[in-house]
Structures are given as C-alpha cells and as structure tokens.
C-alpha cells in the first residue's frame, strides 16, 4: 500500500494563515488577552477559516512564538556570512534583545498559555539553541571566545535580558549587560 502525501496547501489558504499570524503577533504583543474573534476579523478571515488553522488560543500563541523565534534564529548564519564571528555574535545578541523587548506582550501571552493548569508545555528553544551553538562554534574556532562555552551557559549568562523592563530604558541596560557577557566570553580566549 502506497502512502498518500499530504495535499499541497492552496496559496489562498497559505495567505490566510500568514495574515492571521501577522495580525496575531501585533495583537498579542499589545495584549496577551486579545480576543481571537478580533484577530480573525482584523486578519479578514471568517471564524471557520481561523479555527481551521488554529483550533484554540494555545495553538495560535505557540505558532506565533515558533515563527518569531525561527526568524531571530535564522539571522545567526546570515550574520556569520557577512561579519567576523565575534561581531556576528554581538550583533545577534543585540537582535535577540530587540526581539525580547519588542515581544514582551507576546511573552506574557506565552506564559498565560503554557502555565495555565492543563496546558501543554511551552515549545523548546531548539532554533535559538542551534543559532547559539553555531555562533559559539564559529567564535571558538576563530579563537575569539574562551573554549568550552555551551549554549546553555550562554543562555544562562544572557537571561538577565528577560528581567529588564521593556517600558523603561531597556536599550542602555541591555547593551551594558550584553557587553559584560561578551567581555566574559572573550576572557581566556586563545586570541585575546
């Protein structure tokens, strides 16, 4: 018996899904409790189309999060193509900080979705971990950071980003924190 391949997604269906995600990102960033009906209406789709794509709030929030994390993570390899490894790492850290501050509302929606009783666990940070691993490996090979730093070490070191108030002077505070992290990564580097 031959396996059936899934039917390709129609272009109008794909456009509807992308519009829903675009509107959901904006609305959930503004308010974690944005009504799903308002998101559907602003996206210009009917309730049936909306729920065919996203059967519940959790599915929508997780997909918006996954899509955004994928976008930030993808920039790691792009930066390595055009920058020296240490400059690529530092630029990527700035982009991660901008993402974290701009998406503070989305983070609230994620917490509400994944921390509710009976909720599914939040999505893994696979793409971010892969991006960090790529950047760390390039820097270790170039001798611009100390050897042996793991993606878990790096994420722990920058976790202070999520403690910064996005409504305050987040940019200056994030820059100082990330400069400290870079200084720590460079300490003990073979090329230092």
Image: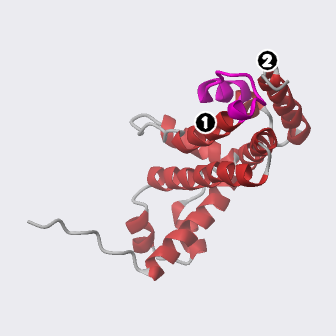
Q: Viewer-proximal residue, 191 or 61? A: 191
- Labels 2 & 1 near each other (Cβ < 8 A): no
From the viewer's perspective, is residue 180 above or below residue 18? above
| Residue 153 is inside the magenta segment | yes
* Image quadrant assignment for residue 159: top right
Residue 98 image point, x, y percent: 78, 47
Q: Earlier in the sequence, mark 2 or mark 1?
A: 1
Q: Seen in the image, is 17 located left or right of residue 174? A: left
Quadrant placement of the C terminus: top right
Q: Viewer-proximal residue, 117 or 182? A: 182
Q: Residues within 10 Å of mark 1 (few under 14, many from 20)?
A: some
Residue 188 image point, x, y percent: 79, 17
Q: Main secondary structure of the magenta part?
A: helix
Residue drawn at 42 percent across, 39 percent down? 119
Q: Secondary structure at mark 1?
A: helix
Report whether residue 168 is seen: no
From the viewer's perspective, is residue 41 above or below residue 120? below
Quadrant placement of the N terminus: bottom left
Give the distance between the C-alpha atoms of the residues marked 2 and 1, in whole angstroms: 19 Å
Report whether residue 40 is seen: yes
Q: Which mark is residue 76?
A: none
Q: Residues within 10 Å of mark 2 (few under 14, many from 20)?
A: some
| Residue 65 is inside the magenta segment | no
Which residue is situated farthest in the left direction here? 1
Q: Seen in the image, is 61 located left or right of residue 83? A: left
Residue drawn at 42 percent across, 73 percent down? 49
Residue drawn at 46 percent across, 81 percent down? 11
Residue 114 image point, x, y percent: 49, 39
Q: Which residue is mark 2?
A: 188
Q: Which mark is residue 133?
A: 1
* Image quadrant assignment for residue 94: top right
The magenta stretch is 139-158
């Amino acid at each position: 018996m031959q396996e059936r391949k899934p039917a390709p997604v129609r272009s109008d269906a794909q456009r509807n899904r992308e519009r829903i995600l675009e509107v959901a990102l904006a609305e959930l960033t503004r308010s974690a409790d944005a009504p799903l009906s308002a998101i559907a209406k602003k996206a210009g789709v009917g309730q049936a189309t909306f729920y065919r794509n996203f059967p519940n709030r959790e599915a929508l929030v997780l997909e918006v999060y996954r899509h955004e994390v994928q976008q930030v993570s993808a920039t790691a390899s792009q930066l390595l193509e055009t920058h020296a490894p240490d400059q690529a790492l530092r630029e990527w850290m700035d982009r991660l900080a901008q993402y974290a501050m701009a998406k503070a509302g989305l983070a609230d929606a994620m917490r509400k979705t994944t921390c509710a009783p009976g909720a599914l666990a939040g999505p893994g940070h696979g793409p971010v971990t892969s991006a960090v691993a790529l950047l760390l490996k390039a820097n270790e090979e170039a001798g611009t950071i100390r050897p042996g730093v793991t993606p878990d070490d790096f994420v722990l070191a920058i976790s202070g980003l999520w403690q910064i108030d996005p409504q305050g002077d987040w940019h200056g505070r994030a820059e100082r924190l990330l400069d400290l992290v870079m200084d720590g990564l460079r300490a003990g580097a073979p090329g230092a």
